[in-house]
Amino acid sequence: MNLPYKWLNDYVKIDKDPKTYAARMTMTGSKIEGWESAADAIENVVWGKILSIEKHPDADKLVICQVDVGAKQVQIVTGAKNLKVGDVVPACLDGAKLPGGVVIKKTNMRGVESNGMLCSFAELGLTHNDLPYADPNGILVYQNEGEEAVLGESVTKALGLDDTVFEFEITPNRPDCLSIIGLARETAASFELPLNLPNPPAREEKGEIKNLLKVTIEDADLCPRYCAAMAKNIKIAPSPKWMRDRLREAGVRPINNIVDITNFVMLEYGQPMHAFDYRCIAEDAIIVRRAHAGEKTTTLDGVERQLDENMLLITDPTKPVGIAGVMGGLNSEITENTQMIVFESATFQGPSIRVTSRKLGLRTEASGRYEKGLDCENTMPALMRACQLVEELGAGEIITGVIDAYPEKKQVRQLPLEPEKICRFLGAQISEEDMVRYLRDLQFTVEGRTITVPSWRDDVETMADIAEEVARIYGYDKIEPTLFAGTTTQGGLTPYQQFERDLSGACMAAGYNEVISLSFLSPKAFDKLRLPEDSPLRMATVISNPLGEDQSLMRTTPLPAMLEICARNYNRRVPAGRFFELSKIYLPQVKDGKADLNTLPDERPQLVMGLYGNGDFFTLKGALEAIFQQLSIHHIEFVPCTDDPSYHPGRTAAIMAGEQKIGTVGQAHPLVMREYGLGSETYLCQVDLPSLFGLVDRRKEYKPLPKFPAVTRDLALLCGEKLPVLALEKAIRQAAGDPLEHLELFDVYQGEQVETGKKSVAFSLALRSPDHTLTDKESDEVMQRVLDALEKECGALIRR
């Protein structure tokens, strides 16, 4: 919605700079997107008077004009044919700027100096509708229409281009603000200024119009109110300059006095209006009804429209004369020969108008207002204003009487004033006296503690709405922010939610991509995983209404979904893939050896990871160790596992926390990979998250940097080839005790230098004392304890 500042001042006398006005209006709920003035694009263009006109010596189509621009006289060469001595015209001096970024400079035209340019209305950003007296093919010759053109002064004031226009963003709940009067009300309340609205004289319903026109509403559910007035002896002519200026500034093109009156009232009151040529209304009757099946009509834009039975029409007994709330019909258009007109001011159901507009692909200023829901009580005042303007402009004579078809009068809404409750609701102390003042400034009627809501404020329905009206005028910036009353609870993640988030981040940091799969499972998946018939994982919860057999069970293992994801990527020629998912399995309650369907299953969160193409068992095991370390989970061991039928028996380990098994990691069994169409070695792991969460060490210990140097020793051992390295690590850590700061495996070797059935395992040890530098003797004692323990517990000897 565009609001010209001068038009606003017709109703509210306000003297604020644009920035101050915009800031206050935005704070009170009427958001201003920006503002502009046509004068900003025009610089150094002044009024000049033609003193003489001489023919150019070297150009038949050019003339040399001497122009009085107030303080000086300038010479300008032009090719215009409509000038004569004494004409007052816009003169662009050297360095002048015009709309569109055009800059005028002093130049030489065929040997004659030209110190500027004389311009037309189009070059000033105007149209022939704005200045109907102007020659459309020549220079603008100014005619005084109430604003004198002073020589040497900028042309913007006399042409009405010096106004500031504000652009408002109107929310759908405030259709009343799609009008100059609505924004004037908001302005007056925001700045506590008096409001001076137009007050056209009322007209009685009885009169001559009753003998000339009859209005019938057949579908009152779509048309709550229809008002009509008539005028005779119509004189079609351009509107006066003040009206043309107001319309242009608001973004509407002036056309003629009758059309401009309807547009002016629509902008002023927010009530769309339409004018019909009375000669085109058959049998002197207007009928408001739904369209008939297959009915067609041609609108003012000359397009034939196909209608349906849900569209509301304005018709006479023989034909449609307009699509209600959208556009009038071409057959009732106002022309220069029109002698008598019918003014329509009606209220239509908003959703109906929106549906009609969308179906026809025809959106107009009127439909944009109607679809938001207009005030029934505004139709008659708008009609009276149109009649008043017809008389003021001398555009015709108003026929006595009006027609007001209003089947069911709109009910007045009343609400209680509850100051204490409003203060608690807002968290601010506002006096009852101030509340009443704010509401009355907004045109609410307050008597005692009863509030009568204005008819145009259908959005005010409850105490909360009243509180909002009070708050926005009081000032949201004055309300101090506080916590929710009655609670000190602060939002945040639970420890387990934070654990899941940290786990997800650690997996991604390790180079794995997160995936999401369905929780459903096919009965065939158990066979693909090579699960024995008596496996408890086969006792799955059956879905009573599955999408299909392949999704008929709630999964008891996440492995099938991860294998399918790996297979899908492999078969699409993705050379390598690393995936993880934080999923759930559904373990049913077992009763009499069967899944109890009457009891909800146990939903166990799981971490499942998959790897193929670029890595092996140790790649996935290393990623798990890094993830556990990042989550502060210690003392996890990987123990060889050969009894899981879904995994390779020689490349699988159980993930142990003491004596508790919390997961499995290893290569998928070759037969399982074949079932899923995987031609590359695939490695999987599955970890029970609740068990893992219980192992998180939430203590944060910080140690100072060591003051004393470490002693490093390398240890190469010869042991049985089937002895787990973990057994060696345990023995070393237990024997070394506190001096052992770091232990790292760096080599495992089997070859010609090592006897059959043996392997060479090499470790790097770092020894350090927190309070002194270890001596060689102390270090040798630690290493001797380690060697004795390795020989005794593991049968491992130092490699010679």
Image: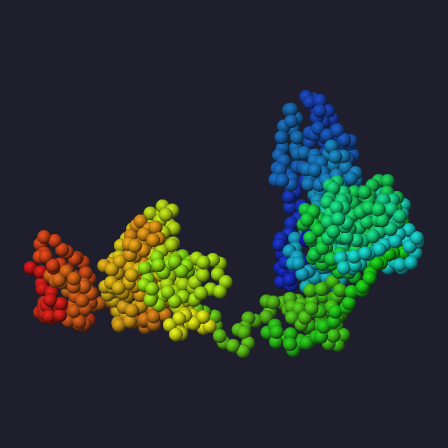
Q: Is residue 298 above or below residue 67?
A: below
**Image location of residue 221, percent across then percent down:** 76, 59
Q: Is residue 39 above or below residue 19?
A: above
Q: How many marks?
A: 0
Whether residue 51 sits left or right of residue 230 in the image: it is left
Q: In which quarter of the image is residue 130?
A: top right
Choose top left, top right, bottom left or bottom right for residue 521.
bottom left
Question: In the current view of this chain or complex, which residue is farthest to the left?
Answer: 800
x%, y% of residue 110?
65, 24
Q: Tell me what residue is drawn at x 67 percent, y 50 percent.
A: 358
Residue ID at (64%, 63%): 28
Q: In which quarter of the image is residue 22?
A: bottom right
Rendered residue at 72%/64% (across/down): 457
Q: Residue 95 versus residue 242: which sits nearer the camera?
A: 242
Give percent across and percent down for residue 269: 76, 56
Q: Can residue 722 be seen in this view?
A: yes
User: In the picture, which quadrant includes the C terminus?
Assistant: bottom left
In the rendering, at what x and y percent does residue 246 appear?
A: 74, 49
Q: In this view, does 247 lie to the left or right of 107?
A: right
Residue at screen point 63% across, 67% down: 475
Decide which of 248, 515 is in the foreground and name it. 515
Return the residue nearer the eye: 206 or 98. 206
Most foreground residue, 61 or 658: 658
Position of residue 215 in the picture relative to residue 635 (left or right):
right
